[in-house]
Image (tube, grey):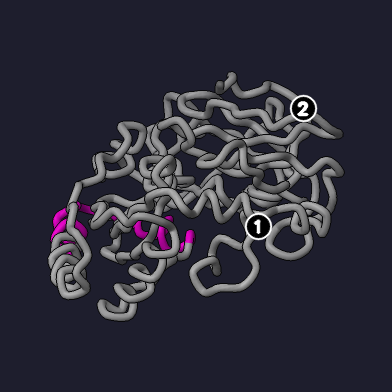
Amino acid sequence: MPVPLPEVGEFVCHGVTWATGDPWLLLAPLPRGPLAYAEIMHQRLGFRVADAGRWCTGRYQFADIVHVEALACPDRAPAEQNGQCWRCASQDDFRFAHQFHQGGHAPQALIRYMAQPHWLYLATFADGATKVGTAAEPRKRSRLDEQGALFATYLTKSPDGRAVRHLEDALARRLQLPQTIRAAAKLQALADLTDLAAARATHEQHVTQAADALSDMNAPLVLEAWAPPAEGDRLRTADSERALYPHDLREGEHGFTPISCVGSQVLAVLNRDEEMHYILDLGVLTGRRITLGPFSSPRAAVQTPLF
């Protein structure tokens, strides 16, 4: 269960999760202890980044046949490849999931996990960029919630993870769509958002093309629209003055209150009576050591547009 954001303490940040339908910040306390799932919406978040290093964000283990759970690094070790230390990477059976459909080694726990139904989806972001992706049945909702999309549609349900990943590759090739979108591009698109019409039209066009392609592949169509979480409503509209947060979250001291959240991107105020809203990506804190406390952001000087 989520807990209030700790007022003080030193942690390795594991980023943002939408595991139960609302955004939490995952924090691994130092020097040891289980992951804390802390609420962030409408709570003051003050922290100082300890240094420029990156630290291991632990691993995933299979809680049962169809679920995985995050574990903190027992050593709080420096990160090596893919944000993990050698010990956590070597024990992380889920790391083989992305190449599962291409053959090669697969632990029994992963084989059982991938044998459950999976979903294929399209997700469109604020600038109209669209990606194709997959989600296991237990992650059908949270996978899309964490993407930071404005619009998304579940295209089809596959019997297992191998089949859905072959469909994903085929659809990406046919429609020339990516399977990932850079976090920095998502953030900039939200900052530049003026209306939803263009992104909505682009999404509908891609869904039509995807439906035609899947029909040619004899894949059963579902075409179920994803309902975005209410926590992101204010970010998905341009009804307030907004600007990119003008400081690097990976260093120094910061303090703000998130008032809206889409994926790991948040709309925040530095002070509750301030009219200017700032867009920032809490995802850049992943793997950073942070000290929570009554910290404040440096003074921001933002030039608002005249027209």
Would you say residue 188 sits in the magenta stretch? yes
Residue 63 locus on image (x, y percent)? 61, 36
Residue 100 locus on image (x, y percent)? 54, 66
| Horizontal side, residue 46 vs residue 160: left or right | right
Q: Secondary structure at mark 2?
A: strand
Q: Nearer the viewer, residue 302 or 219?
A: 219
Q: Secondary structure at mark 1?
A: loop
Q: Amino acid at mark 1?
A: Pro
Residue 6 locus on image (x, y percent)? 67, 22
Where is 247 relative to 188, above or below? above
Quarter of the image for residue 145 reads top left
Residue 162 locus on image (x, y percent)? 44, 64
| Closer to viewer: mark 2 or mark 1 | 1
| Horizontal side, residue 182 vs residue 249: left or right | left
Q: Amino acid at mark 2?
A: Gly
Q: Nearer the viewer, residue 246 or 205?
A: 205
| Screen quadrant of the N terminus | top right
Q: Which residues are magenta?
A: 183-202
| Screen quadrant of the C terminus | bottom left
For residue 107, the mark is 1
| Horizontal side, residue 94 vs residue 147: left or right | right
Q: Residue at x 47, y 65 (%)?
A: 182
| Horizontal side, residue 228 vs residue 39: left or right | left
Q: Residue at x 73, y 24 (%)?
A: 8
Going from N to C along the chain, the mark reached first, 2 or 1, is 2
Q: Residue at x 30, y 65 (%)?
A: 130
Q: Nearer the viewer, residue 177 or 93?
A: 93
- Which residue in the structure is indicated by mark 2? 9
Q: Is residue 123 visible?
A: no
